[in-house]
Image (cartoon, helix red, strand yellow):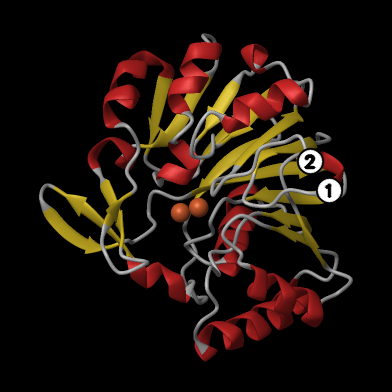
């Protein structure tokens, strides 16, 4: 088992205690586990790196960079990473090289693809993944294998283009991180396009660790504009409480303010909010 020390380097939310840290629509997490240094995503720009300096985190020593999925608010900091770190192994779904990503939220389509040329130039440093993989004794990167639970309503605004053909985003490039700690499984997710319950089930199945003690990630409950989404939150909380009574749920990024309020109202003792500079350990 390994302990984990985690810091959110950049997020949509800031906090009064961390006024000097940048915020943006994006997510980047830094953590120590298995005596290695890890980054999970890089936000939208170089703000993750600026915040790392302010937080005293040396990004040149990071051993592994993991990408959760292809969207630009998670991959946009790649150039600033490659300028600062020459040693880390990079892990990402093989789909990041072949897929373009679009969002239709706010009416007009907008491209949110990663910089494919940069990924290509990173070349030998990148390990392209077609599924789940154990990266160190207690840290795994986990693809979706469970699909029975609901997925966020907001996914309907997202598409991918592959070989010129546009289809609804199937989130099959999405990778969570599972860390086996003495208190149980800690799961990191970014947008959870595949659905929180599906992601937890996939991590339990891959690691064989049934005791899940924490889920830390965005939940893609962006607008909460539809009653369907509000029902999803109620159902999600009930199922999480029943299946994982010890769970701590920390969310931010693409979990919008209304969804956060509803989550906290329904599960005040189980739900916390992360932000740029948020630190947590297990
Ligand atoms: Fe996101
Ligand atoms: Fe996303």
- In what element is the residue under mark 1? helix
Q: Quadrant of residue 204?
A: bottom right
Query: Horizontally, is 162 left or right of 261 in the view?
Result: left
Q: Residue at x 39, y 44 (%)?
A: 70
Q: Residue furthest left?
A: 164
Q: Residue at x 71, y 35 (%)?
A: 138
Q: Residue furthest top?
A: 86
Query: Horizontally, is 129 left or right of 137 in the view?
Result: left
- In what element is the residue under mark 2? loop
Using the rendered image of the protein, determine whether residue 166 is visible from the camera's viewpoint. yes
Residue 209: where, in percent of width, then height?
72, 52
CA neighbours of label 1 inside 10 A, class few (<14), some (14 to 19), many (20+): few
Using the rendered image of the protein, determine whether residue 282 is visible from the camera's viewpoint. no
Q: Residue at x 34, y 26 (%)?
A: 119
Vertical placement of residue 225 versus 78, above or below: below
Between 45 and 139, the one nearer to me in the picture? 45
Q: Quadrant of the N terminus?
A: top right
Q: CA distance from mark 2 to mark 1?
A: 5 Å
Vertical placement of residue 237 versus 169, above or below: below
Query: Horizontally, is 177 left or right of 69 in the view?
Result: right
Between 108 and 69, the one nearer to me in the picture? 108
Residue marked by disc 1:
16
Residue 12: where, in percent of width, then height?
62, 51
Q: Residue at x 46, y 69 (%)?
A: 147
Residue marked by disc 2:
19
* Pointer 2 with pointer 1, Cβ within 8 A: yes
* Rendered image: mark on residue 171: none
Q: Quadrant of residue 244?
A: bottom right
Between 220 and 192, the one nearer to me in the picture? 220
């Amino acid at each position: 088992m390994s302990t984990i020390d985690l810091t959110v380097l950049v997020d949509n939310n800031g906090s009064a205690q961390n006024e000097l840290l940048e915020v943006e629509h994006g997510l980047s997490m830094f953590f120590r586990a298995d005596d290695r240094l890890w980054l999970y995503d890089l936000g939208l720009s170089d703000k993750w790196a600026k915040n790392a300096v302010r937080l005293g985190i040396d990004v040149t020593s990071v051993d592994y960079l993991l990408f959760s999925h292809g969207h630009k608010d998670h991959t946009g900091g790649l150039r600033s990473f490659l300028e600062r770190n020459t040693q880390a192994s990079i892990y990402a779904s093989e789909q990041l090289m072949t897929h373009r990503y679009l969002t239709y939220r706010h009416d007009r389509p907008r491209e949110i693809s990663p910089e494919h040329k940069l990924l290509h130039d990173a070349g030998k440093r990148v390990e392209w993944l077609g599924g789940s993989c154990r990266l160190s004794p207690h840290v795994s990167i986990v693809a979706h294998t469970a699909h029975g639970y609901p997925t966020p309503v907001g996914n309907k605004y997202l598409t991918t283009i592959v070989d010129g053909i546009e289809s609804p985003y199937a989130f099959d490039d999405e990778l969570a991180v599972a860390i086996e700690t003495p208190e149980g499984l800690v799961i990191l997710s970014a947008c959870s396009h595949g659905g929180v319950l599906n992601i937890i089930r996939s991590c339990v199945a891959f690691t064989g660790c049934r005791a899940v003690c924490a889920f830390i990630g965005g939940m893609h409950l962006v607008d909460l504009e539809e009653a369907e989404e509000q029902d999803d939150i109620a159902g999600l909380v009930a199922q999480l409480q029943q299946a994982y009574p010890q769970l701590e749920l920390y969310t931010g990024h693409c979990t919008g303010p209304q969804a956060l309020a509803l989550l906290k109202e329904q599960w005040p003792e189980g739900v916390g909010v992360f932000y740029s500079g948020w630190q947590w350990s297990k």
